[in-house]
């Protein structure tokens, strides 16, 4: 019995050891298979090729300060009371057109006094001239002393100078009298009227504001790589933020035919400073805007985008490929299917595609899927966009 029991226990021990060994074998085999599967696993991702495309690069400015060169105050050149007003707000006026008429009661009195002084001076000058001519003849005959001749000459010259002085005074008074009519210094729209009928104004008082907003201007600082793509005379379309309501600061009238928020504005490059031939990191661009729709006024506008009318041919990838906020990194797919982080230098973009200046070649495949959790060395099964 003992022999049978011992043999049974030995067989049980051998069976247990065999089971343990087989279990260890299966575990090792499974681990190797899992490792191999993990090594050969390919993540399904979407990709796109770097290609030469035509893009219309968008530039967005947080604020733009619009101004007009043709905007000035109408100023009274003399003191007086406003007795006539020929304009109303929003009226279009031409340069030289009379806008107000002032009355200065002192000017007519001074002109009459000047006329009296001129008449008296002319009589005195006539007498002095007659005396001077007579003494000149006597001098030629040596019938008068030089002292007498010099005295008559001095009286004559003094009378002549006095008359000329009164004539000059009257001329100035006549000019002041003409300034009683206040005229428009430029052609444009009357934006504001500061002084009303019956008001008394002094010389230098601002009476109205006139502006012509058919053409507006603004300046933008741009990096050299963007400015180099621009030329004087080039045009772009301005796209204003959706919240822009085009409220008029001066309450001036809108032109007929404008489309409100749907209105398209065209800006043209007037000047690039410094010139593109000179070395500079930042350049100032002067723009002119066609504002015949009458919607824009001199003030700040927020979130304005520039959309060029001419296409820019360049090597591009979708903006979705960029893996960082600074647009300097993306994931590139190698020939063996692995992915790696790639540093690139980028340029302009149109909101969908971005220009690649260096770091990629045409035909390179980049990942446009969500890149969260990706690391260099992972294998990917990439579906190319459009294929």
Image: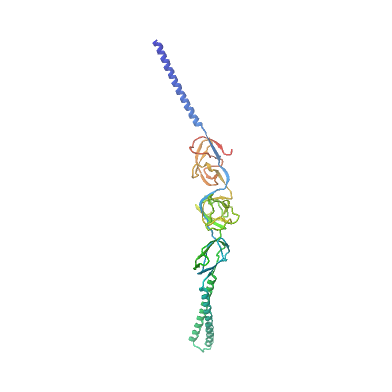
Query: What coloring was used for the rendering?
Result: rainbow
Name the quarter where the N terminus is drawn: top left
Whole-percent x and y of residue 166? 52, 77
Residue 341 percent coordinates (x, y) = 49, 39
Quarter of the image where one finds residue 88 = bottom right
Q: Nearer the viewer, residue 84 or 254?
A: 84
Q: Is residue 284 visible?
A: no
Outermost residue, top side? 1
* Observer-nearest of 230 and 171: 171
Give residue 334's position: percent from left, percent from top.
53, 37
Residue 220 vs 200, above or below: the answer is above
The relative height of residue 95 versus residue 295 in the rendered view (above or below) is below
Q: Residue furthest right?
A: 257
Picture quarter with the C terminus: top right
Name the quadrant containing residue 211.
Answer: bottom right
Q: Is residue 130 visible?
A: yes
Front residue of 266/24: it is: 266
Residue 317: x %, y % from top left: 55, 43
Between 134 and 125, which is closer to the camera in this rendering? 125
161 above or below 342? Answer: below
Say above or below: 88 vs 244: below
The residue shown at (46%, 25%) is: 27
């Amino acid at each position: 019995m003992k022999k049978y029991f011992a043999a049974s226990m030995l067989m049980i021990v051998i069976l247990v050891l065999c089971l343990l060994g087989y279990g260890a074998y299966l575990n090792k085999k499974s681990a190797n298979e899992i490792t191999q599967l993990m090594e050969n696993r390919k993540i399904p991702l979407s990709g796109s090729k770097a290609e030469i495309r035509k893009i219309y690069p968008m530039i967005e400015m947080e604020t733009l300060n619009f101004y007009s060169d043709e905007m000035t105050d109408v100023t009274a050149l003399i003191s007086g009371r406003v007795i006539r007003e020929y304009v109303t707000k929003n009226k279009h006026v031409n340069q030289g057109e009379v806008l107000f008429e002032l009355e200065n009661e002192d000017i007519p009195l001074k002109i009459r006094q000047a006329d009296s002084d001129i008449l008296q001076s002319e009589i005195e000058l006539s007498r002095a001239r007659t005396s001077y001519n007579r003494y000149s003849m006597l001098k030629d005959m040596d019938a008068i002393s030089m002292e007498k001749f010099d005295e008559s000459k001095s009286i004559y010259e003094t009378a002549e100078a006095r008359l000329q002085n009164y004539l000059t005074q009257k001329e100035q008074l006549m000019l002041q009298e003409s300034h009683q009519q206040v005229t428009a210094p430029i052609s444009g729209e009357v934006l504001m009227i500061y002084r009303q009928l019956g008001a008394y104004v002094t010389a230098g008082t601002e009476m109205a504001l006139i502006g012509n907003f058919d053409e507006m201007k603004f300046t933008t600082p741009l990096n050299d790589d963007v400015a180099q793509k621009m030329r004087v005379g080039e045009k772009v379309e301005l796209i204003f933020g959706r919240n822009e309501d085009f409220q008029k600061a001066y309450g001036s009238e809108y032109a007929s035919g404008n489309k409100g928020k749907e209105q398209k504005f065209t800006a043209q490059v007037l000047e690039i400073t410094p010139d593109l031939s000179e070395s500079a990191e930042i350049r100032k661009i002067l723009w002119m805007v066609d504002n015949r729709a009458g919607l824009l006024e001199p003030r700040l506008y927020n979130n304005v985008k520039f959309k060029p009318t001419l296409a820019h041919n360049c090597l591009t990838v979708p903006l979705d490929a960029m893996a960082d906020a600074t647009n300097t990194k993306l994931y590139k797919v190698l020939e063996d299917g692995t992915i790696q982080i790639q540093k690139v230098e980028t340029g302009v973009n149109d909101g969908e595609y971005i220009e690649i200046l260096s770091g990629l070649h045409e035909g390179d495949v980049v990942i446009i899927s969500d890149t969260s959790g990706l690391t260099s060395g992972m294998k990917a099964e990439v579906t190319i966009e459009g294929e």
